[in-house]
Amino acid sequence: MRKIFVTGIGTDVGKTVVSAILTEALEADYWKPVQAGDLEFSDSIKVGKLISNERTVIHSEGIKLSQPMSPHAAAEIDNVEIKLSDFKIPVTNNNLIIEGAGGLMVPLNDKDLIIDLITELDAEVVLVSQNYLGSINHAILSIEILKSNGLNVIGIIFNGNENVETEKYILNYSGLKCLGRIRQHQTINKEIVLSYKNEFMSFSA
């Protein structure tokens, strides 16, 4: 069983799409430890609607919060105490794709961040990057904090329109592998997700 934690260089860079593609490619299980807001159309529901295979199990979120904001703030509104020790890996013999909330330094409580959750879960990391003004800075900062915490970073997946110079700089500076690219699509559906299966099946090796 591999535990692969999908995190991003920031919010809204495509973690859910990448998670769906990796889940489909590996026919892995999927788990979202923290869902803040959008409970009627959560990331778990989105991924479930994008998966075609019959092996994947979408596990229930670890913590569900009503407000679409940082988990620490949403938890305070909902009168919920988030502790790292409360997060339990779902019981499965399958590979598991774990999707984070926001970026690495998003707070879960007064002292713990998403990166601390990755350490607690002892997961490998896939970093999702998207090209925009400032993305080099955000990507390198994310990579440096992952490395300084001793986490195993499998590599980077770029989501969206290509920027050759930006991507080249991030990869050369970090020494990380580009695991693949998700092209820009007007809509994401099962067919689009399935079309990436062969490209990302190598994760199972």
Image (spheres, grey):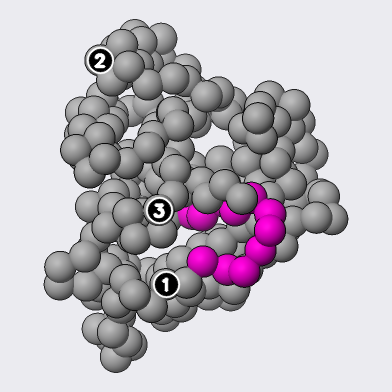
- Mark nearest the camera among 1 and 3 is 3
Q: Earlier in the sequence, mark 1 or mark 2?
A: 1
What range of the chain is rendered magenta? 89-99
Q: At 24% from the left edge and 83% from the top edge, which residue is drawn? A: 76
Q: In the figure, residue 109 lies in which quadrant?
A: bottom left
Amino acid under label 1? Phe
CA distance separating discs 1 and 3: 12 Å
**Side of 115 relative to 137 (left or right):** right
Q: At 66% from the left edge and 63% from the top edge, which residue is drawn? A: 92
Label 2: which residue?
Answer: 173
CA distance separating discs 1 and 2: 34 Å
Label 1: which residue?
Answer: 87
Amino acid under label 2? Tyr
Residue 101 visible somewhere in the drawing: no
Q: Residue furthest left?
A: 110
Q: Residue furthest right?
A: 54
Q: Earlier in the sequence, mark 3 or mark 2?
A: 3
CA distance separating discs 3 and 2: 25 Å
Label 3: which residue?
Answer: 122
- Mark nearest the camera among 3 and 2 is 3
Residue 165: x percent and y percent? Answer: 34, 8
